[in-house]
Amino acid sequence: MSTMRRIALIICLICTSCIVNAQNWILKNKVAETKQKGTGFTPVQALSYERTIHSNASAYQILHIDTIQLNDLFNAKPQALTITIPLNENETQTFELIRTDLGNVNFTKNGGQKEYNVYVPLCYRGVANGVTEKNNAMLTISPGYFSFTAVSASHVISIPTFSATNKQELKLFDSKTFSFDPADPIADCGTHAVPTPDALKAIQLGGDQNKTSASQDKCVYAFVECFDSLYAELDSSYQATVNYVYALFNNVATGYLNEQINIKISAINVWTSDDPYSGNTREEALADLAAYYQNNFWGNICVGLDYGTNGRSGLAGSIGLAKHISPNVCQVYTVANNPFLYADMNYGYNVQNFPTGPNVTQQQVYLTMHEIGHLLGSAHTQWCGWVLNTNPLVTGALDNCTAVEGSCSPGPAPGPFGGTIMSYCGGSGDPGISYNNGFGNLPGAAIRNFVSNQNCISNCVSCPANLSIGGLAPGAQVFEVSNTLTATGTSSAFAYATLDAGVKVVLSPGFHAVNGSRMNIIINGCGGIR
């Protein structure tokens, strides 16, 4: 059985090698804010140590899991929890996690057929209690599925699967005592497009990753398209495919959260019958995917997930391109440039300290983050157009891990902790790419600037019970309420508004939408667009 097919508990404890201040530790700040609001943290002690198994020069732990307590946890859906993980016979670690919202996801199959029989996984993020070094912890659960990840420069811990003979046993592997086989590099990213004008502007603006960015107020919604091959790899189970996507995006979105970018899911479509996409090359698969939907999908970007037989890596349709979350608004699709990406999840590369396990591997997290980074405005680190100095203007590559893209000298060698997300530092002889390093200063700034300045990417919305809105200015806007949304005044030309109410939307007497404006009225309510 493929390792991706197994229901798993994954634990990878990741910290950076240096102590960071609280200002840059977003998850720690969010946990502290949750405590300040008086939110209670539900204790979870569903795992207990049983024994140690020695295998050749390695050793791993056998843990017992209380499945009843896990089912109770899923049904209770607490806003915050503490979970205690036994690392060995004598050592445990407690993590403080807060519930996170990946979006009010629309579940469909085969291009748009509504799927109702779905358990929506719960996602939590947080930090290791009492650990002063920066770390990220992520938990994804649904009935019969439990995936916990966290990351450390010192070691990786993985609890990959239930025992074949005992469904209440889990194996815990720790890189301090167990050797993980490195992944063989397969193929590099195929994205070599020229950055769009918006991306070039974002790159040239530069910025400081330690400063608060306006991008943290916006939400980037991904429409996730699961090819029939991924569905087949996950036991031809719709629920297993949904679990996989949630665990993947919990890890991906946490990495982006560290860069002040909010990534959410607008919809998941799973092809349970033959998908309409070519299996010959990644270029053909991406072209087919983009042509199939064009601008007609819910989401700012579209993420296509394949599971090919030859490990084709990934490819983005542009560097710096996003539409509005609503279909056919802020239309940007062309054959040459589009907000789609293709990612082959049957993928290997030399990455370090990414969330890992048989469900969602660290290579898959890296690949998805990398290709989304292209759509949100970042070129590769080996690109010659990075602004290294402004007075005088000096441009060049950021590292020397592969041949440069353009005409310049190679950049400096990456540090001992490896390359960043948009780099190729996973090749033979390279130090690898580390989740802890994030995107690095200049690529991270480019992404933050791009998201901040995109009128087609809306601010994240709060969700009051009732709301009255006046005149609508030009640009993309989303309003959500749980009860009644009332529109008054005038919707100006080039205003693209989505009005989403749980009960009703009222266009009051005197409301007027001028020629050139567009409105989508939806009865759905809080939590994103369904």
Image: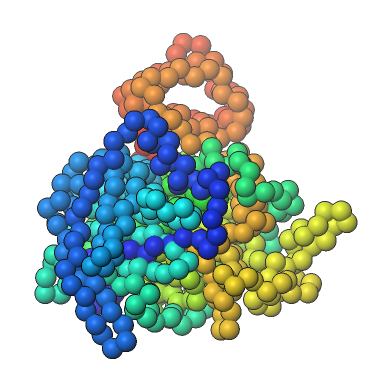
Which residue appears at 35% of the width and 68% of the height?
157
Q: Position of residue 231 (x, y in %)?
A: 30, 66
Q: Position of residue 344 (x, y in %)?
A: 44, 70
Q: Quadrant of residue 138?
A: bottom left
Labels in figure, total? 0
Which residue appears at 18% of the width and 72% of the height?
51
Q: Residue furthest top?
A: 509
> Is 247 placed left or right of 135 in the picture?
left
Which part of the image, by quadrant, shows the C terminus? top left
- Residue 236 in sight here: no
- Residue 53 in sight here: yes
Q: Nearer the viewer, residue 16 or 484?
A: 16
Which part of the image, by quadrant, shows the N terminus? bottom left
Q: Nearer the viewer, residue 277 or 202?
A: 202
Q: Position of residue 301 (x, y in %)?
A: 50, 52
Q: Quadrant of residue 387?
A: bottom right
Answer above or below: position of 452 versus 493. Answer: below
Q: Residue furthest bottom?
A: 56
Answer above or below: position of 337 versus 82. Answer: below
Q: Quadrant of residue 471?
A: top right
> Is 366 placed left or right of 361 in the picture?
right
Q: Nearer the viewer, residue 142 or 226?
A: 142
Answer above or below: position of 244 versus 254. Answer: below
Q: Residue furthest front?
A: 90
Which residue appears at 58% of the width and 30% of the height?
495
Specify how the rendered protein is coloured: rainbow
Which residue appears at 38% of the width and 30% of the height?
37
Q: Position of residue 282 (x, y in %)?
A: 50, 72
